[in-house]
Amino acid sequence: MEIRTFGKKSAIVAVTIGVLLATTAPPAQADTKLDPKALQRSLNEVHEAGMYGIYTEVRDGRQTWRGASGVADVDTGRPVHPGMVHRVGSITKTFVSVAVLQQVARGAIDLDAPIGGYLPDVVPGERGQKITVRMLLNHTSHIADYVLPAFPSFLENSPRSLDDNRFRTFTRRELAKLGLDAPPTGEPGVAPGSYSNTGYAILGLLLEKVTGTNAEEHVTRNVIRKAGLRHTSFPRTPRIPGPHSKAYERFYGLIDPPRDYSVYNMSWASTAGAIVSTMDDINRFYRALLGGRLIGAAELAEMRKTVPVWVGLGTLNYGLGLYTYDLPCGRFWGHSGGVFGMATESLISENGDRQLSMGVNLTMYHDLDENRYPLPHPIDRAFVDYLVLAACGQTSATRSSSLVPFAVDRLTVRR
């Protein structure tokens, strides 16, 4: 993981929740044979390195392996299991993007039309005419993220806002205004973009404008149900519906011991990150998406047009609600997500055969050095080892041991 500090206060404002291997070797084909013993052993190593609990599902063709390691409750020792309902954070963005692209196919939304033409009261004036729907989807709008304004104590390196906002209800318009009132991160449409949850809050308002339906209800009917997902939803209360782990946030040692935030009003994440799901459902969703069952070929092609986007200290090749992962065995698509106390990764290979989704229940677990950068933690390497083994069927002996920061998701974003 990496962290970026800004300004004289060295405020914690951006982190990654994963690292990937740097390798100069040519991509190798993933081993199509799942090895349950090796996968469980690697999963156990993530827990033994300090992660409270991790749960996962790996698929290759018709083969499926589900595993878990660790505890869902550190006080009682209740174990985690693979079917737990989990807050998946910014994976929500892929769902929302699919809903928008469905409306593009209907002719109700034009990807390259200015957002001000649809929502002049939300993004008014010249800015509303320069920023297009596509720019909101691929983070090149350069509208600032709303998370820091919503959690102002983060600028003081304090987690106080976490507790202040536990039961606060944010409206989508309020979130949009928080981001729009902050200084922009650049000129609209200029690459690299800058990852911002505000764009996806505005896209929720856009869906409501063109469909006349609450955005969460629309996504549920037209994306979640269409994909056949049974354990995926926008929760109506601060509680996670169904069997779930607690969500432990450490905030780089400022919360010690880590505190449980599994009961939390997720209106702050909205259409940028409020969905809960299971690892099985998330795999089903991405398989349905890349298999052409949720949007047409033309819309899927638009979704896979990527631009560089800054997240934390690195850049992603970001499309419309999903991005690429380049692993030793080739290119994968997917997204990651994180909210306070829970983080998720989901990957699917180019041909759709190999899939991996995993969730963890402890976030911001690093200590910081005197410059407020995270110190290496054993969880990092164990996490990468499991990810590459699950995605590629390779062990650490077959790949480079050099680790590079991989900007996956900002914990001060929709987390």
Image: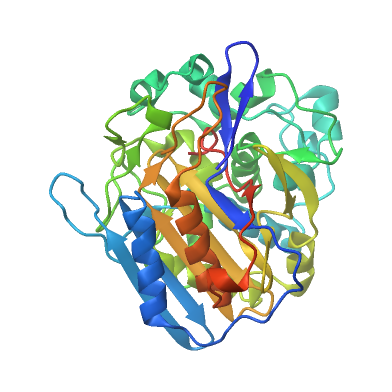
Q: Which residue is drawn at 33% across and 24% down?
A: 163
Q: Residue at x 57, y 27 (%)?
A: 13
The residue most toward the left is 76
Q: In this view, does 326 lie to the left or right of 46?
A: right
The residue most toward the top is 8
Q: How many labels does the image show?
A: 0
Q: Where is residue 87 in the image (x, y as percent from the top left)?
A: 40, 50
Q: Is residue 80 left or right of residue 274?
A: left
Q: Quadrant of the N terminus?
A: top right
Q: Where is residue 141 in the image (x, y as percent from the top left)?
A: 77, 36
- Closest to the observer, 182 or 254: 254
Q: Where is residue 137 in the image (x, y as percent from the top left)?
A: 71, 47
Position of 268 relative to 58 (above/below): above
Position of 291 relative to 121 (above/below): below
Q: How is the image coloured?
A: rainbow
Q: Where is residue 66 in the image (x, y as percent from the top left)?
A: 37, 74
Q: Which residue is drawn at 54% across and 50% down?
A: 18
- Residue 49 is at least partly visible in this image: yes
- Closest to the observer, 108 or 186: 186
Position of 205 relative to 303 (above/below): above
- Closest to the observer, 242 or 253: 253
